[in-house]
Amino acid sequence: MKKAVLYLENGMTFDVRSFGAGGTKVGEMIFNTSLTGYQEILTDPSYAGQFVVFCMPEIGIVGVNDDDVESLLGIPYASGIIVRNYNEFYSNFRAKESLGSYLKKHNIIGISDIDTRFLTKTLRNEGALNAIISDDIFNIDELKSFLKDSPKIGEIDYISDISSKSQKIHTKSIFEFSSFSYGAPTFKKKIVAVDFGIKQNILNELSAVGLECEVINHKFSADNIIQRFRDREIGGVFLSNGPGDPKILKEEIKEISKLIEAKIPMLGICLGHQLLGLAHGYETYKLPFGHHGANHPVKNLQTNEIEITSQNHIYSLPQSIEEIAIITHQNLFDGTIEGLRYKDSPIISMQHHPEASPGPKEANKVFKYFFDMVENTN
């Protein structure tokens, strides 16, 4: 492993070791509390532009395999990862290569030998911080200047590079442990899934309840979708997760507003949840350090059940959206909105990831609810 340096916008500097790709990269540093699933996190397009600090101290033990990939293109999107201890030696019967070789292949920085507990406390106290990692620039003034001149994550449109360039039908269902493979779905209704950085397992869960998903680019025509809905070719629309500031997507928000007016059944997850709020006229705001992890308790206000959820977002919708929507789910860490059901439209949305199955799977009932909504509206 090579020597490297981590410099934060608050002036903190750390000498570290690099086990991934070389060079110099800038990102927004956040922490993730998940104990497992580093490959799913790396390949979730929502992490584009971010350095992920893993609270789990030992990373790399299970290697990397061909199946646990969330992005449609099968590639990772995080800008880099930061761990306490990196394990080059892996031990898992599904693994194909080490995490380090995987990062090098995809030009992603990985650093270790740093107190990730201290970094996590820093981010918790100061909020998400812009950072720069380099294994070839060691002059602090040069690093500071490089970081200052780099665009912030909220100013970058990552989605144009991530979103599907052509329409495609998703053909897999959920993972079956009996065969260690993804099942074949039986479709009953068809929907359009707008790709802002969609995760494969969301599509798998939609398929599992009987929804055939036609994945389309984020630069979509609402008029075309509305006509297909009226012709009964499709029964609804799914708005996916994705990276960055939702307010960047001004044209897409206008198109979503047209879908709302047409009373088309819709489900939004994460970024899709935020875009629906913006399309209704309610501004998102940025949380200090966001929610990133697989152990977040969410209260289902409809059933009074507690659901353990997976989360990855740093933007949220305001409480004032209660004027037009019923809050169905609430985060028990900070009280923020986790789910909505709109009062005058067949629209529901979730801020967390009900497909991610962080151990329990009780949060995924929303997909059956959406299927029923699609079926009953047509």
Image: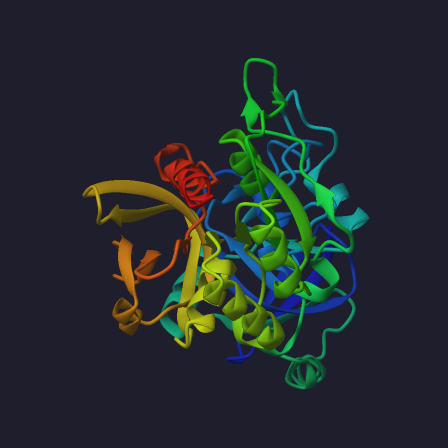
Residue 367 sits above or below residue 42 on the image: above
**x and y percent of residue 298 in the render?**
29, 48
Can you see residue 184?
yes
**x and y percent of residue 86 in the render?**
61, 44
Farthest residue to the top: give it. Answer: 178
303 to the left or right of 359: left
277 to the left or right of 239: left
Residue 238 sits above or below residue 67 on the image: below
Residue 247 sits above or below residue 186 on the image: below
Is 371 or 175 nearer to us in this picture?
Answer: 371
Residue 291's quadrant in the figure? bottom left
Farthest residue to the left: give it. Answer: 304
Farthest residue to the front: give it. Answer: 231
**x and y percent of residue 377 in the render?**
43, 46
Can you see residue 198?
no
**x and y percent of residue 51 in the render?**
59, 61
Q: How many marks?
A: 0
Residue at left offset 52%, top offset 35%: 205
Residue 205 sits above or below residue 230 on the image: above
Residue at left offset 61%, top offset 31%: 62
